[in-house]
DNA sequence: GCGTTTTCTGAAAGCGCTTTCAGAATAGCA
DNA sequence: TGCTATTCTGAAAGCGCTTTCAGAAAACGC
């Protein structure tokens, strides 16, 4: 037999209880709560006292139903896996902190339910708008939401053609341009490995295009055998480099794709007796907190993830306020030079 | 002038629209949606077709109001700052995935609003129960929630006296015992620095007690000048060790408190020309993903954070189902030996 | 065939709040 | 003092859904 050790709650006080105790109507209590119409100071005082005595908190669902808003912002994420998440959430929280919105987070790819009225875990049934992280929503679902006028802001991927959905990303082109210039012009590297992110990842594609463009501009060939897939993970980075080494491929630098992958790259190089940066220079992307502590401290492109979260949430708040935020925002990135490239900065 | 580029939404279809199209009452539609009473197959088919044609999704607030449940689990966190968060959330999500609950995350210490009816960001006004992370709720608020019978599970701190609230933590005692034994018995260290976590942190206090107890059992003195505060941060760890070094204090090992602090400890030692582990052994706690990539790879106590999230959420689901979960759960930890202690394992 | 039970369905009430309209009381002005 | 405007308040309707009760029709058993 189950027995609930938690004590049974008295029913929650309602607005009617407050009204009764204060000797007024529920309309008056609502007016005091929401400051929607004048109430005499004496009555207001009685209402506030009743609220305090009863420890009354408004029932959010009732309020949401009556005002036809959820006062909730959704954040749709894929499976939580990397170091992006904490700074992103921090940025989002910083933006919504002064508002009345609450943040609903969905962070997994749930198995679709076999009932036709259950769509995305976050949508207009439970939020006023949402932030959508790359790879966390079915494109058809995204389009459906857009066509219904559900406010959204995209993170790290652009909207479908003809859909005017604001999005926030990084200036991948400038970042990769800086990486290549630094490796080629400062350190004289000529055989540079490019590790891709996951298949179909927009950031990865953009970074690769910029990589190729800059290499061509500088007159350095991109060898096909030097392009592999690190999948933005330590494991992927390590496997990819180990494979190149096993195949006897010659290279003097690695752009690892991101910092997670860079750690795997460093491990594979260390295990194979390659010195970093003397034999092989290594550069990452993200500048996660740990990168400075690696050995050698990682040269990487600093991507302002927290700011991305803040900007995205700010755009969504604008949309919700009936404004028109800028459609595409590319946050500037910056090459942070430490030691893994061959420089000697901390 | 503001102009909203998002197209105006048609009003959302309601249950009445579905009923009208299917030629039945809203009661029947509700019965089909919720499988609460028999409906003839012919009628059910008509209803499902209407739902699909109208792309109907139930209005969550209406449903919540009618059933007097929110079908929401709250997760109350302090400011998102460390590497705990992603695995914790992953564990929570894994537990609630097969259920109908949605996860509401509050991850900042908002300034309290100056209105008397606004309490905790998460409470019975917007959730059916919540997980409370250490240092994320005012103790009076916690007690108030408990007295109202609001289901809660605590993460990494025990409940107030006489409050029977389930909690999940780690077996700090065994973890620290293993650390001390390893440093003393295997590596012969005698002057071990203990870096504390934030003031009042339960984990920190428990680990210190176990540290002292094991040191005494092994006949190794705990020198007062070797106990300092690293605050569970890289910065704190670095500052604390730098100060000991500056004061000329002699030590041959450091228990850093957690892995974040250990990175700071490594940095300070490196800058001061101390070799790790030859001159000073270093041990952390948590085993965050990056620890294996440090130089040297960090010997640390593996704490199953994801499992903690999973167990905590499972306990809360039990409470919500009217069951009585085990009150205190201590998850086992395990010393993961790498190289920073003086061993030579990867 | 008749009485009883089961299946199915719609109407009405209600969840807890917001908002609008009507009316009473008060204040201001000529 | 009388008229008009303003302030304040309560009653009622409604947000979109769930649930209960009543009643009709069908099925079952003797």
Image: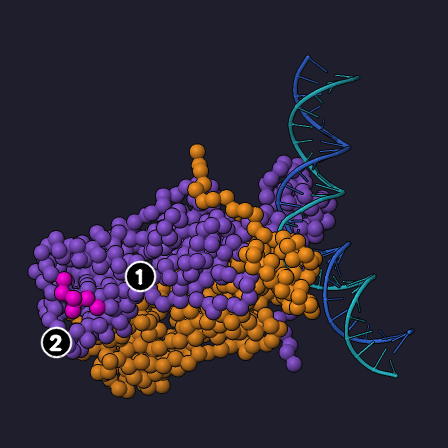
Chain colours: A purple, B orange, C blue, D cyan
Q: Is residue A224 magenta?
A: yes
Quarter of the figure with the C terminus of chain A: bottom left
* Residue A279 location, quadrant: bottom left
Q: Which mark is residue A127?
A: none
Q: Position of residue B178 (x, y in %)?
A: 34, 83
Few, some or many residues within 10 Å of mark 2 (<14, 14–19, 20+): few
Contact check, label 1 and label 2, Cβ < 8 Å? no
Q: Residue at x 64, y 77 (%)?
A: A3
Q: Nearer the viewer, residue A343 or A228?
A: A228
Q: Chain of mark 2?
A: A
Lateral position of residue B5 relative to residue A268, left or right: right
Residue ranking furthest to the left: A188
Among numbered discs 1 and 2, the one appearing first in the sequence: 1
Which label was assigned to residue A201?
A: 1
Quadrant of the drawing holding the N terminus of chain A: bottom right
Give the side of residue A297 with respect to residue A91, left or right. Answer: left
Which residues are the magenta region? Answer: A222-228
Find the distance from the CA under tag 1 to the CA under tag 2: 29 Å
* B273 horizontally vs A29: left or right: left
Q: Are marks 1 and 2 on the same chain?
A: yes
**Residue that appears at 40% across and 61% down:** A136
- Percent x, y for residue A189? 10, 62
Check disc 2 and report the residue beneath it: A248
- Residue B225 seen anywhere in this rendered image of the structure: no
Please check the rendered image and state whether residue B268 is part of the magenta-colored stretch, yes or no.
no
Looking at the image, which residue is at 47% across and 69% down?
A111
């Amino acid at each position: 037999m189950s027995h609930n050790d938690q004590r049974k709650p008295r029913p929650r006080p309602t607005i009617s209880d407050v009204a009764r105790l204060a000797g007024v109507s529920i309309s008056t209590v609502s007016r005091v709560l929401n400051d929607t119409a004048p109430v005499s100071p004496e009555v207001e005082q009685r209402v506030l006292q009743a609220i305090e005595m009863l420890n009354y908190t408004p029932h959010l669902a009732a309020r949401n139903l009556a005002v036809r808003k959820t006062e909730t912002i959704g954040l749709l994420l894929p499976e939580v896996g990397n170091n992006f998440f904490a700074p992103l959430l921090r940025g989002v929280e910083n933006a919504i902190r002064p508002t009345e919105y609450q943040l609903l987070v969905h962070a997994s790819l749930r198995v679709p339910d076999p009932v036709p009225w259950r769509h995305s875990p976050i949508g207009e049934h439970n939020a006023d708008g949402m932030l959508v992280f790359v790879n966390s929503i079915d494109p058809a679902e995204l389009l459906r939401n857009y066509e219904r006028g559900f406010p959204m802001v995209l993170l790290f991927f652009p909207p479908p053609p003809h859909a005017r959905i604001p999005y926030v990303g990084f200036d991948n082109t400038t970042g990769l341009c800086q990486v290549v210039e630094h490796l080629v012009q400062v350190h004289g590297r000529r055989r540079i490995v490019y590790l891709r992110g996951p298949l179909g990842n927009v950031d990865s594609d953009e970074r690769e295009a910029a990589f190729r463009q800059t290499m061509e501009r500088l007159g350095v060939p991109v060898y096909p055998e030097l392009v592999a897939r690190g999948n933005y993970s330590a494991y992927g980075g390590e496997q990819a480099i180990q494979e190149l080494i096993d195949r006897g491929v010659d290279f003097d630098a690695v752009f690892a794709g991101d910092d997670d992958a860079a750690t795997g790259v460093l491990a594979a190089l260390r295990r194979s007796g390659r010195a970093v940066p003397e034999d092989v220079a290594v550069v990452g992307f993200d500048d996660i907190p740990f990168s400075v502590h690696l050995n050698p401290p990682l040269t990487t492109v600093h991507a302002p993830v927290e700011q991305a979260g803040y900007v995205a949430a700010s755009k969504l708040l604008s949309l919700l306020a009936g404004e028109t935020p800028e459609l595409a925002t590319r946050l500037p990135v910056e090459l942070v030079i430490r030691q893994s490239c061959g420089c000697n900065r901390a």
